Image (cartoon, rainbow, N blue to C red):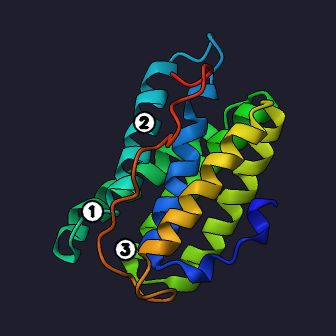
Amino acid sequence: MSLDDRDLTHLSLRGIAVYVARSAHRLRPLLVLPEEERQAGQYLAELDRAIEDAEAIATLELSEFAGLGERLRHDVAHSRLVSHIPLQTAASTIATAIARSCATTEAVIKGNAQTALSYAQFSLRATEEAARLAHVEVTVLSALRNDYVRLQAETIIAFPELGEPIDPGPLWAHGAPDWWV
């Protein structure tokens, strides 16, 4: 079953944002920037923060969204910069997945349900492709299946509603794979 086979509308907007942020988080260690890229360390730190910000929507109350929205606008801009660096295909696809996961969360915060759904679907296609290119498809897709089932079980109000704060659980339910650091 591919990620496209899942109906994201069975999740709340918050669940969708968390789902794609966690998919990007799992791939982030595989993103290696070229050594000649002067700002590689800064870019990677920005991406790590972007993923952390995108995942934060899981537990924040609505009143806390304003500050997160400001950070995400910055995160989306920086993650798009990284996705334009000449990279190998897998790394470029990972950067795209991260950028779209941040854009998904930003759209959720703005209340743009259809835009969030569109960005989420794009992010998940990039995640699936990046996992395939990096030869970690089985591990990543298995973890995402677990996420989907868990998030769907916690969903009381589904798309296009925001939903309540949720506990997405550990990133790797059965322990992190050897390649993930």
Q: Are marks 3 and 1 in contact (CB under 8 Å)?
A: no
Foreground disc of the pair 3, 1: 1
Q: Earlier in the sequence, mark 3 or mark 2?
A: 2
Can see residue 103?
no
Q: As shown in the figure, which amino acid type bears the numbered disc 2?
A: Asp
Q: What residue appears at the point 57 percent right and 46 percent down from the top-left corner?
A: 24
The picture places residue 178, in percent across and down from the top left corner, at: 60, 19
Question: CB of mark 2 within 8 Å of CB of mark 1?
Answer: no
* Position of residue 27 in the picture relative to residue 129 (left or right): left
The Cα atoms of the two marked residues, 3 and 2, are separated by 20 Å
Q: Is residue 27 above or below residue 108?
A: above
Vertical comparison of 21 with 30: above or below: below
Residue corresponding to mark 2: 48
Q: Which residue is mark 3?
A: 109
User: What separation in Å lies between label 3 and label 1 (alpha carbons)?
Assistant: 13 Å
Relative side of 136 to 20, left or right: right
Residue placed most toward the observer, 100 or 127:
127
Q: Who's the residue at 36% across and 81% down the image?
A: 163
| Kind of element beneath mark 3 | helix
First-in-chain label (2 vs 1): 2
Local packing at callout 3 (Cα closer than 10 Å; few below 14, some 14-19, many 20+) is many
Q: Earlier in the sequence, mark 3 or mark 1?
A: 1
**Residue identified by numbered label 1:** 59
Mark 2 → mark 1, Cα distance in angstroms: 18 Å
